[in-house]
Image (spheres, helix red, strand yellow):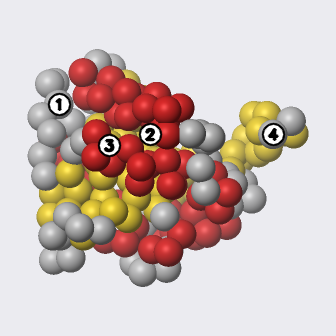
């Protein structure tokens, strides 16, 4: 299963491969306290953010995931990022992730983008299951996944340490209703 990187478009959005020109926008997102409040990754400089850009490229190279830059259809406005990672070929599953710059919250972007990412995972990567792991206190993200037909499966209590305190993680999943169980 070699992952080929498509550009995916909607009427108003474009999902495309990251380029070096996206470094500053990724830094703006992953250094913003509102974005990283529940997110597991943050950076304090442009130089440090290069690590994230390398991670995006390594996902593709190692066939362990695929993440897109989410932009306006004309490519002039960067909104955020979303994709699949932690692909387990033998179990036909992956983890979904996403973030948006705060000025683009509440505009229906994720509602438009997430189904496309899931469709790509199911149809192009042969996935049976897509999982979302959400900080249990992140009610916006949990509500968003529920609206997108992700099923809540439970909460792992005090399973991670972030900023020196234990956090619980809610588990959501979507199954490919068109795939067989084997």
Residue placed most toward the observer, 166 or 75 = 75
Q: Does label 2 or label 1 sit earlier along the sequence?
A: 1
Q: How crowded is mark 4: few (under 14 residues within 10 Å), some or many (20 or more)?
A: few
Q: Does label 4 or label 1 sit earlier along the sequence?
A: 1
Q: Does label 3 or label 2 sit earlier along the sequence?
A: 3
Residue placed most toward the observer, 93 or 40 = 40
Q: How crowded is mark 1: few (under 14 residues within 10 Å), some or many (20 or more)?
A: some
Q: Which mark is residue 95?
A: 2
Relative horizontal placement of residue 33, taking residue 57 as reference (left or right): right
| Callout in the foreground (2, 4) | 4
Is 174 drawn above or below residue 121 in the view shown? below
| Residues marked 4 and 3 touching at CB (< 8 Å) | no
Q: Residue 67 carries which label?
A: 3
Pointer 4 residue: 163
The answer to which image quadrant residue 161 occupies is top right
Relative horizontal placement of residue 162, taking residue 18 as reference (left or right): right
Real-space CA distance between mark 2 and mark 4, rounded to the nearest whole angstrom: 23 Å
The answer to which image quadrant residue 1 occupies is top left
Q: Where is residue 101 in the image (x, y as percent from the top left)?
A: 49, 64
Real-space CA distance between mark 1 and mark 3, rounded to the nearest whole angstrom: 11 Å
Residue at 58%, 45% in the rendered image: 133
Q: How crowded is mark 2: few (under 14 residues within 10 Å), some or many (20 or more)?
A: some
Real-space CA distance between mark 2 and mark 1, rounded to the nearest whole angstrom: 16 Å
Is 73 drawn above or below residue 131 in the view shown? below
Residue at 30%, 68% in the rendered image: 77
Real-space CA distance between mark 4 and mark 3, rounded to the nearest whole angstrom: 26 Å
Pointer 1 residue: 3
């Amino acid at each position: 299963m070699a992952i080929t990187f498509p550009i995916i478009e909607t009427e108003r959005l474009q999902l495309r491969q990251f380029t070096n020109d996206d470094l500053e926008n990724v830094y703006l997102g992953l250094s913003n306290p509102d974005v990283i409040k529940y997110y597991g990754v943050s950076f304090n400089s442009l130089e440090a953010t290069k690590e994230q850009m390398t991670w995006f490229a390594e996902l593709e190279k190692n066939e362990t995931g695929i993440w897109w830059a989410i932009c306006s259809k004309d490519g002039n406005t960067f909104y955020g990022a979303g994709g699949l990672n932690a692909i387990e070929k033998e179990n036909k599953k992956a983890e979904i992730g996403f973030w948006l710059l705060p000025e683009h919250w509440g505009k229906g972007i994720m509602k438009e983008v997430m189904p496309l990412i899931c469709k790509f995972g199911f149809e192009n990567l042969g996935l049976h299951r897509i999982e979302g792991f959400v900080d249990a206190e992140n009610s916006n993200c949990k509500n968003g996944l529920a609206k997108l037909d992700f099923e809540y499966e439970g909460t792992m209590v005090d399973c991670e340490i972030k900023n020196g305190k234990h956090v619980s993680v809610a588990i959501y999943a979507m199954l490919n209703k068109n795939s067989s169980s084997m």
